Amino acid sequence: MRALLTLCAVLAMAGCDTKSSPAPDPGSAPPTTPPLSDPRPAPRPVDVVTDDGVEVGLGDDGSGLAPMRPRRRVNVDQLEAAILEVSGGINWTETRNRDEVNLFSELSATLGKPDYAQSTDEDLEPSILFQKFLDDASRTVCTRMLTADLAARDDPESAHDPVLLIEAGPDDRIDEAPDLIEANLRELLLRFHGRMVPSGHPLLANWTWLYRSTDFVTQDPTQGWLGVCVGLFTHPDFYLY
């Protein structure tokens, strides 16, 4: 009985709503809804030229400056993957009791990787401790990269692709073969930082100075490339994006 009364009440309310809202005239035009206006202002294009001479268009926020965001550091997994890609598969490891220990995995907590017990967010600050470990990793990996390139040159049957001595040889010096030194620096900047630098570009000056200085102090051209390799790994353009 109670369910029947509830059903009757619902039908009565529906009937009242039907009577209060007249049915539309079949011959009349359907009502039109006015279009919504977009409150967002249209961006004003700004012509921007990058270091490579490529023109790009960016929206302007009214300040007259190109929009930008703070650069971020790669996490531990991304850093390890980047080093493996650049070095041709050479990782930061250490031999202990005849076993190769992956130092990225062993020091992951120290480098800021969360353990999901005491921390859940990865620390991505380029701290002094991070710089110290990156310097250690780069020296180890660069030494092995140079050793692999030199060994491949002595072995005519080696299938190793050079990763450090790409255009220049181990005995080439900047006073005797400046074109080969510059070509090798350009290849390394492309490999490490993804920068396609044209010949004679001012960006090459600092790396040329680093190579020349190391070669002058050590009197060994290969040590010059070792210094450049470490510098490229520890440069912000390698671990920041």
Image (cartoon, rainbow, N blue to C red):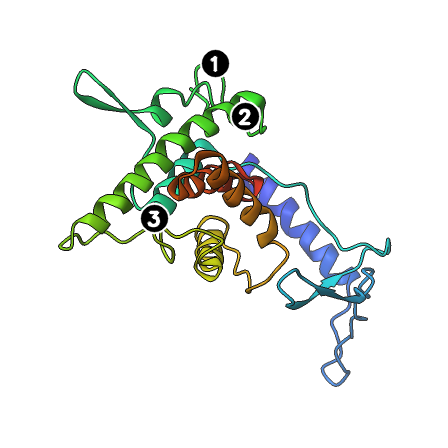
From where the camera sits, is residue 215 visible? yes
Amino acid of disc 3:
Pro
Q: Nearer the viewer, mark 1 or mark 2?
A: 2
Amino acid of disc 2:
Asp
The residue tagged 3 is 170
The residue tagged 2 is 123
Residue 124: image x %, image y %? Answer: 55, 30
From where the camera sits, is residue 121 visible? no
In the image, is residue 130 above or below residue 223? above
Residue 186: image x %, image y %? Answer: 49, 57
Mark 1 neighbour class, 10 Å CA radius: few under 14, some 14 to 19, many 20 or more: few
In the image, is residue 72 above or below residue 191? above
Tell me which residue sits at (57%, 22%) in the image: 128
The residue tagged 1 is 118
Q: CA distance from mark 3 to mark 2?
A: 40 Å
Which label's residue is closer to the chain start, 1 or 2? 1
In the image, is residue 143 above or below residue 38? above
Residue situated in front as seen by the camera: 35 or 188: 188
Tell me which residue sits at (68%, 45%) in the image: 69
Tell me which residue sits at (57%, 39%) in the image: 236
